[in-house]
Image (spheres, rainbow, N blue to C red):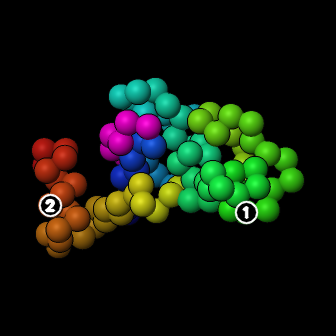
Amino acid sequence: MGYHVHMCWKCGKAIIAEHPVGRTLTCETCGQDIRSCKNCAFYSPQSFHECAESVEDPVRDKERANFCDLFRINPSFTVDHDLTSSKDTSSTRAFNSLFGD
């Protein structure tokens, strides 16, 4: 069983969550919604409707949670952690240093 460590797009603090990322998940540090356009892999300020995907109905507030079916957490904001693995990889060491394991 694994879980994923996400980062808040606004403050950069780590957020532990299971997949899929729920619409009500917020950052405990700053209160920002995690399932928002700004945390999405397709967020692209230069693109039409600020989305790299073809969307007909634009999301007005890119910082708030929404119901977009295309949402994918930005992979640059994610670190996978496998609870069943005992390997001490560099990502595991980095995770443990963050959470004091």
Q: Give the structural element (helix, strand or loop) at label 2.
A: helix
Q: Mark 2 points at which residue?
A: 93
* Residue under the point 42% across and 60% down: 76
Q: Give the structural element (helix, strand or loop) at label 1.
A: loop
Magenta region, residue range: 10-16
Image quadrant occupied by the N terminus: bottom left
Q: In the current view of this chain or complex, which residue is farthest to the front?
A: 46
Residue 69, image x, y percentages: 73, 54
Residue 100, image x, y percentages: 13, 44
* 44 or 2: nearer the viewer: 44
Kind of residue at badge 1: Glu
Question: Does the magenta portion include 11?
Answer: yes
Q: Name the residue under label 1.
A: 53
* Residue under the point 79% across and 62% down: 54
| Mark nearer the N terminus (1 vs 2) | 1
Crowding near pointer 1: few (<14 within 10 Å), some, many (20+)?
Answer: some
Work out whether residue 70 can be spotted.
no
* 38 or 27: nearer the viewer: 38
* Residue under the point 86% across and 53% down: 56
